[in-house]
Amino acid sequence: MSAPSRSRWLMRGLLLFVLAFANLNDIWSPDVLPNALFTFTVVREADVDYDEFVMRPAERDRLADVTTTDAMRGAKLDSEAYFFRACGKSTATAPPKTTRSPGGPPAPGPNDHVCSIFPPGMALLAFPFFLPFALSGAEALDLGLLLRVGHVAAAVVETIATLLLWSVLRRFVSERWALALVLLYFLGTSVRTIASQALWQHAGVHLAIAGALWLVLVERPVNLRRQALAGLALGLGGVARQTTVLVSLGMSGSFFVRPLAVLAAFAGAAVGLLPLLLFNWFAFGSPLEQGYGTKPFDTPLLEGLAGLLLAPSRGLFVYEPWALLALGALAVALWTSRRAGDRLGPLLLVWILLLLLYSTYAEWWGGRVFGPRFLDDLAPVLIVGLASGISRGMLLNTALRVFFWLSAAWSFLIFNAAAFVYDQSWDTYPTNVNFDASRLWSWSDPQWLAVLRALPGGGARVVVAAGLTALALLLLLRIERVIASRR
């Protein structure tokens, strides 16, 4: 890569990184704390348990009897919090006083070592960002430190994933279309409201999928080494979220057409998944044990499908209607003979597989979040599907072109509104959606409408955030225009 080309990609990356912060809104949940604390416990304790950061039930009950100020001086995390479990089999004999997710592992006993329920992928990606603070003696339970550094780590990982995706898009469409689709991905999906904001698993999943797509979606024949590396990337993505490894099922085309390529991808995925198995063995005593416990997949299939696709406050086609075009383009690619399309089409089957899997999940809505959290793990696939469709002339049809731009504008509007003002209050008041999901089906008070209504209340902060966002976008457009003029 030439020096001008490196500079161009560096500037793109810097501006995408700025966009991840330009919303000036702290979006997080307690979910991200174990990933943020991981470096501190590994460096300072040489283990993966969180014993030094938690208070046991007896201590919690004692603090309940003192003033709030005194309690905050010794603030630690509750060992019975939903994101903790025993490092092994729990010895708890009494039910926890804190609410835990249905079907998850039991709370740790009073004397059990405490581990995170989450796989360690994002914690490992964030490790170098927290390492200087862990070595310098910084206070590990400084919430501001955990959230700010975690935000930086998530934004960097998501920025790299986006740049890889951008490179893939250029193999299908022009620079102008690639820019439009990159912005749709970054600003019109959960990237700006979840993946780039804190140490949830999504950025790691996006990095793995974008890396695998970059390796195999090329016009020339793909050798077995690249197939294996793509599988390896997805296996490593499984260390962030286990379902990522399933994407390897569709990354190499049909088994009946290219059996060696599929086997190479499977072998790479198996190797990539080894760190997760080793971590499970070290943390829980068995490579096949995993932190989530025996989460139930007992939601009626049709109910879950309707929720994931059409629910007013979680449905993919409500928040991202343009996904219909992306899925149609993937269906077309499934039947083509073009080399890149030949490898892209089977990913539609993987998308459907994950849709069916999450449709039966007990918490199919993904907790207290904005938008279609689980399905947006595969947002890179949908964006590349759109690029494939555009390269085949899909938007030459006037009706489809109007539908695409209107639906893209809708996604830009609601996701950026959420980036400015979303604070989880809709998810918890007057009822908590994790315990009463019926609210997700209400058209009279959908989540996105609550966010739009909250915009005026954001005041000067929203005005400044919108200005910073617009400035970053103008700079990005200016850079792309200069690049185009020099060609």
Image (cartoon, rainbow, N blue to C red):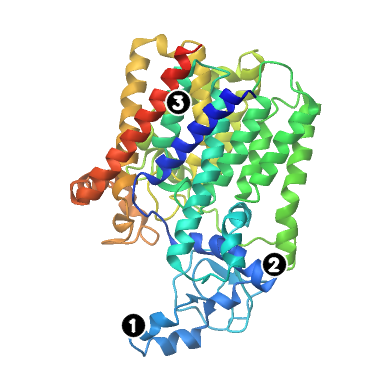
Q: Which mark is residue 68?
A: 1
Please tell me whether residue 405 is drawn above or below residue 189 in the rendered image: above
Three-letter residue code for mark 1: Thr
Could you classify mark 2 by the number of other residues whose Cα lies within 10 Å: few (under 14), some (14-19), or many (20 or more)?
A: many
Q: Nearer the viewer, residue 303 or 272?
A: 272
Q: Nearer the viewer, residue 9 or 113?
A: 9
Tag 2, which secondary structure?
helix
Quarter holding residue 105: bottom right
- Report how far apart the C-alphas of labels 1 and 3 lie in the structure: 49 Å
Q: Nearer the viewer, residue 264 or 2?
A: 2
- Report how far apart the C-alphas of labels 1 and 2 lie in the structure: 34 Å
Q: Nearer the viewer, mark 1 or mark 2?
A: 1
Tag 3, which secondary structure?
helix
The residue under label 3 is 181
Q: Which mark is residue 410?
A: none
| Residue 289 visible | yes
Identify the residue at horizontal 34%, vertical 49% (top origin).
24
In the visual, does 47 lie left or right of 385?
Answer: right
- Tell which circle, 1 or 2, labels the residue nearer the N-terminal end: 1
Three-letter residue code for mark 2: Ala
Q: Nearer the viewer, residue 396 or 128?
A: 128
Dot 1 and dot 2 residues touching (CB under 8 Å): no
Three-letter residue code for mark 3: Leu
